[in-house]
Image (cartoon, coloured by chain):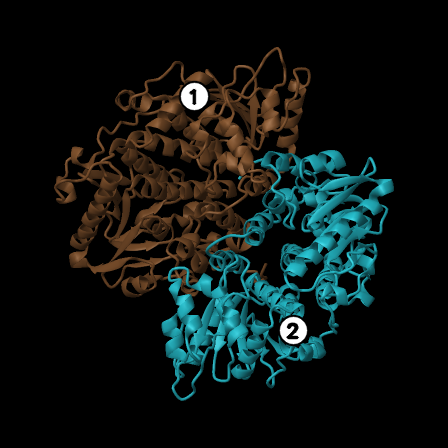
Chain colours: A cyan, B brown
Amino acid sequence: MISFQTSPEQYKHWKLSFAGAVATLSMDVAEDQTLAEGYKLKLNSYDLGVDIELADAIQRIRFEHPEVRAVVVTSLKPRIFCAGANIYMLGTSSHAFKVNFCKFTNETRCAIEDDSGHSGRRYIAALNGTASGGGYELAIACDEIYLVDDGNSAVSLPEVPLLGVLPGTGGLTRLVDKRKIRRDRADVFSTLAEGLKGKRAKEWGLIDDTFPTSKFEELVAARVTKAVELHAAESAEDGEGPDPGGSSPSTKSQASLGRTGGIRLGPLSVAQEGDERNYKYVSLKLNREQRYADLTVRGPESNLPTSVEEIQQLGDAYWPLRAYRELDDALLYLRVNEPEIGLLCLRASGNADHVLAVDRTLAAQGEHWLIREILLQMARVLRRLDLTAKSLFALIEPGSCFAGNLLELALAADRGYMLNNPDEPVALWTSELNAAALPMSNGLTRLQSRFLAEPERVEQVLGHAGGFDTEAADAAGLITFAPDDLDWEDEIRVAIEERTSLSPDALTGMEASLRFAGPESMDTKIFGRLTAWQNWIFQRPNAVGPQGALTNYGKPTQAQFDYKRT
Amino acid sequence: MISFQTSPEQYKHWKLSFAGAVATLSMDVAEDQTLAEGYKLKLNSYDLGVDIELADAIQRIRFEHPEVRAVVVTSLKPRIFCAGANIYMLGTSSHAFKVNFCKFTNETRCAIEDDSGHSGRRYIAALNGTASGGGYELAIACDEIYLVDDGNSAVSLPEVPLLGVLPGTGGLTRLVDKRKIRRDRADVFSTLAEGLKGKRAKEWGLIDDTFPTSKFEELVAARVTKAVELHAAESAEDGEGPDPGGSSPSTKSQASLGRTGGIRLGPLSVAQEGDERNYKYVSLKLNREQRYADLTVRGPESNLPTSVEEIQQLGDAYWPLRAYRELDDALLYLRVNEPEIGLLCLRASGNADHVLAVDRTLAAQGEHWLIREILLQMARVLRRLDLTAKSLFALIEPGSCFAGNLLELALAADRGYMLNNPDEPVALWTSELNAAALPMSNGLTRLQSRFLAEPERVEQVLGHAGGFDTEAADAAGLITFAPDDLDWEDEIRVAIEERTSLSPDALTGMEASLRFAGPESMDTKIFGRLTAWQNWIFQRPNAVGPQGALTNYGKPTQAQFDYKRT
């Protein structure tokens, strides 16, 4: 079983250090510490285990070190920044694992951009050596890229020319959509196995600058200082309090940066017994024979504190943070460890008033860094749900608590079933958080995505006083079906049976197409277009067949292609 | 060899009739008239041959019958509108053929929407029987959908539940993005093999209305009349001249509709000899051993007339119409008949002044229906080029004529090579048409797509006086490489060899990702996201393996799925 929980003390591949407003995240992959047998992580190449640590580090910087304004991503290996995803690992992995591996690394790169875009931390890739493939894709997820000019180091995306696959972690999309590299140059770069060195890489916009070896550390440090100052100034405008000294980042006190009181993210305790996996607020029950799982999120037990000080004291025990971290872990567990589970039946239980009170607090205090981070984390977890290749049914029954932020679970579902029985009333509730705080990857809220045809319904639903009973929810368009108590059990059973009998591949493609209507963003392009093409290529004999490029990489044999174009 | 040329006299599967402002396109597929062996086209199911006729009919309505304001798409078979793409044809086709078949049907649906969106013709799907799969996808490409209420007829997308693949012709995207069906309802509909009948289909927005059998013809005719009147009124506002009578469409004279003088689209003459395929203005030379083709477009031989009357007299001999029809045919030929050709070397030859003069005429007369249709046709052909899964290099040499509309070929290319030799000057020229008239599928011009990072360059390039010599073209960012005469031959040869040595699948995915940066449209979603997912699924054992759903459709054996979700 692959676990997604880790912490800096346990890191095998990264060093995370802090100096005032600057965090440094140094890659130093331990060759032998692999997640599976059969490959060595040479040259800072990575497998899923390396990326789990990276995702954890980014998360911890956000919650544990709010004073950080710039994150330097670099390598401790000489002459190499990162060689990308390990080819032998890819060559020996199943199709499903490759796809889920790429999805997770993509989400981690998006988390970097989410932090940069919303929390004002500047990510600086200090390429002290070559960055190839996934290594360059990590760099391009950062805001600034500096490459050492040592006559040898280059940036490259050698996947197409060397491996017959695509850069699988957003590289192509970010080339033309983020860095807006001219498409003919992107074409040349993406077919050039050896990549480009400093001067031309800078000229083409692939990096921001290149510095000679002897001055690399000093000049990168100067850029980092500049980034910190810039962001301190921006934060001052935001009312977060200026940095009075204007001194170098490492001498700034946390207090002067206006962001203090980082909270520690402790380990999540989870009890796995047989087909159940229980966290404090999240439970998973696997019905393996029927290929579906019940996923239940519980609301807080009582009314929670409303002041930021009290919330900071609660730290990672605060319900929205804990519950969504658990949900995140459960989703990742399901994706990687339970591929045969094709359907999640989503339930929410608890007291809606408590959940709605939490939402009021979060909405009211959203300017505070911690509350903002909690909201951004909830939004990321919900996007992880949207992007999970499993069918999602929301089951809205007596005792359920799809209120406010938990209503997003029902809105993320492919279908919602709500019991229609006057003797056992059920309800749905909206809150402030359904209005804007928890956007999907396409930039719309789930309500906006739902009501593309009738946008006025969004305001109607948000303005509705009190809960929606089943009839009102149906009339408002919030649910798909409202079986009565006589039909409920049969209808749900049949719906589950039907769903899990369908082709899992067709469902994946269908859900990816129906869940993301409306506008597109760089993220949806990466998870929709680029991922779909990569999945296609990952199936092709030219990549993974006995004579495919991925299969034959590093062997004395050479790839033999079927040159038919499709 | 599959030919894409046809004409109404040759149609086997469609009847095209005209009554004043109304064209009726009736599907009546001849079971035995298939493009290949091994299947029968029962129940108005279709293969590529049926869709080639549909594409031709739409094209002819636009050029030959400008008076038409409404196109009724219906069936001559009782109780069935269209059963979609023939499953046995799909089951026996190669992967490459399936993919190219879907691409062409997608382009044909987009051509319907292009006509509706830009030429003001209203497409009305009169479903006198069940429309399933591709049949409903044809309907949803129309503006209005009416379904007979006979207690039996339904609309459906049974691909996911019955065949384990996706609706391959834009259905899912149009459900949620065009008709903006609520995503949970789209989910239910797309997994319901039997589909939905009139009442619920209307309630969910899948059709616009449903009429009882006895009144179907009459009520559809009323909607058609309304559509014609609406569009006549809109055209009046556009200055095209109103319909003074306001009478029923069939009694309107062509003159009263302000659009007269349709021109006949004659057959294209093409000489195929060995590895050459020569049209009047387009030549194709296949270098089969090296897996690339030279594709040359020649400009007009002389200065062409500038008045609409003279152009109407020239008819289909008018250069921009003829040359782009030939280019279209050449591209379709290459896609379907020459799958191993992986690279097109694009050349343009002729006199730039003549081409630029044509562009001035087209730009000045764009309000006239014929000129507008010619421009829209050029734009569609260029989009077909963008969407062709072959690498594109533009070779800009002495005697070349990449001017105005032909410059778009160079801008569509993945790379441009321009000779840099003072003794043999070469140039590129822009015209009015590079500014807006020939948009890509993403809604941007090719110049805008090229200069996403520096949008001011678009205006600079368009404002440049005279041609760009090699240095100026390089400085302006219009070309990728400018080898001198000593290097030219070697550099081109090596570039071709390198390109055609790469994995054709990786190139397809890479090009689809790099060619369409910037905004997304319904079209790019269909050709990017949906097509990529469909291609993936078309490779999966769950669809096409010995136990796959597509393989086992209609057999006594049943599909057996590997239920792992990816």
The residue positioned 66% from the left and 42% from the top of the image is A548
Label of residue A321 in the image: 2
x and y percentages locating residue A556 in the rendered image: 77, 39
x and y percentages locating residue A125 in the rendered image: 74, 49
Query: Callout 1: few (<14), some (14-19), or many (20+) C-alpha neighbours within 10 Å?
Result: many
Compared to residue A213, the image places residue B5 above or below, namely above
Residue farthest toward the front in the current orientation of the protein: A244
The residue positioned 70% from the left and 76% from the top of the image is A312
x and y percentages locating residue A219 in the rendered image: 81, 45
Residue farthest toward the bottom in the current orientation of the protein: A423
Mark 2 is on which residue type? Leu
The residue positioned 63% from the left and 35% from the top of the image is A185
Q: How many marks?
A: 2
Q: Quadrant of residue B148?
A: bottom left
Q: Is residue A252 left or right of residue A284?
A: right
Q: Is residue B217 left or right of residue B424?
A: left
Question: Label 2 vs label 1: CA separation?
Answer: 64 Å
Mark 1 is on which residue type? Leu
Compared to residue A216, the image places residue B10 above or below, namely above
x and y percentages locating residue B351 in the rendered image: 46, 15
Circles 2 and 1 in contact, beta carbons < 8 Å: no
Camera sees residue A194: no
- Of all chains, the one bearing label 2 is A
**Do the residues at discs 2 and 1 belong to one chain?**
no
- Of all chains, the one bearing label 1 is B
